[in-house]
Amino acid sequence: MIGVKICGITDTAALAAAAEAGADWVGFVFYPPSPRALTPSAAAAISAAVPGGPARVGLFVAPSDAAIRSVLAALPLDALQVYADIDRVAALCARFGLPVWQAVGVATQADLPRAAADRLVIEAKPPPGATRPGGNAVAIDWAMLAGWTAPAPWLLAGGLTPDNVAAAIAASGAAAVDVSSGVERQRGVKDPALIRAFIRAARQRTSAAA
């Protein structure tokens, strides 16, 4: 079955929809410039309101150890997703004893990572003038990933929506996908109906094959 992560959860309705629809992971953003950023206490309250369900992933950008500790003190996380180089990824894994996912922006095949984190999130490089890392709702050339020998399990991210996720999976060979803005009704606010539609569309090929 195709794995699905719904990132940038900001309220209990979105988390409940992701859980009910069978998402594998949900992401809480701890990067203040993001419109989806939460404080540790806010994320903890949302998570506690919908116990169980998807694994919780914390998203950090070039985080200090102290920043991660402050989140973990409020909210148990199942994994850390970070924008950092591979050496920092390894250090964080050793320091906190949690799986660490490395987010990697790519523009060409030459950008695809060769070193392994616990998991990779593959997305577009930020466009010129972007104020945040990440795909910024821009899709990469999915075909460049077909046949790629990845050093670790990976998720395809960036520019995915309920309308294009099935095509993205078919073109890239992705076994898991990660969406944020593609399931929002307005900036930073998830739409439960779009969350359900995205998960259904991502898994339609699996259902058809079965």
Image (spheres, helix red, strand yellow):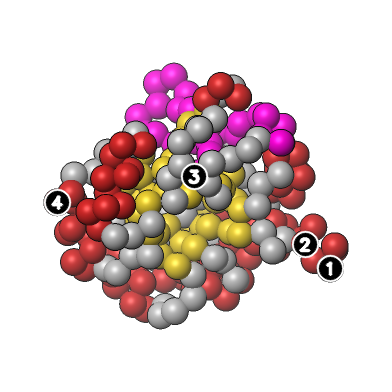
* Residue located 39% across and 34% down the image: 133
Quadrant in which the C terminus appears:
bottom right
**Is 41 placed above or below 99 here?**
below
Question: Which residue is disc 4 drawn over?
Answer: 66
Q: Earlier in the sequence, mark 3 or mark 1?
A: 3
* Residue 147 is at least partly visible in this image: yes
Tell me the CA gap for discs 3 and 1.
27 Å
Question: Which residue is disc 1 drawn over?
Answer: 210
Q: Earlier in the sequence, mark 4 or mark 1?
A: 4
Q: Earlier in the sequence, mark 3 or mark 2?
A: 3
Tell me the CA gap for discs 3 and 4.
23 Å
SS at mark 3? strand
Question: Which residue is disc 2 drawn over?
Answer: 206
* Residue 185 is at least partly visible in this image: no
SS at mark 1? loop
Q: Earlier in the sequence, mark 3 or mark 4?
A: 4
Tell me the CA gap for discs 4 and 1.
46 Å
Callout 2–callout 1 Cβ contact below 8 Å: yes
Question: Which residue is disc 3 drawn over?
Answer: 120
Coordinates of residue 207 in the picture (x, y in percent): 80, 66
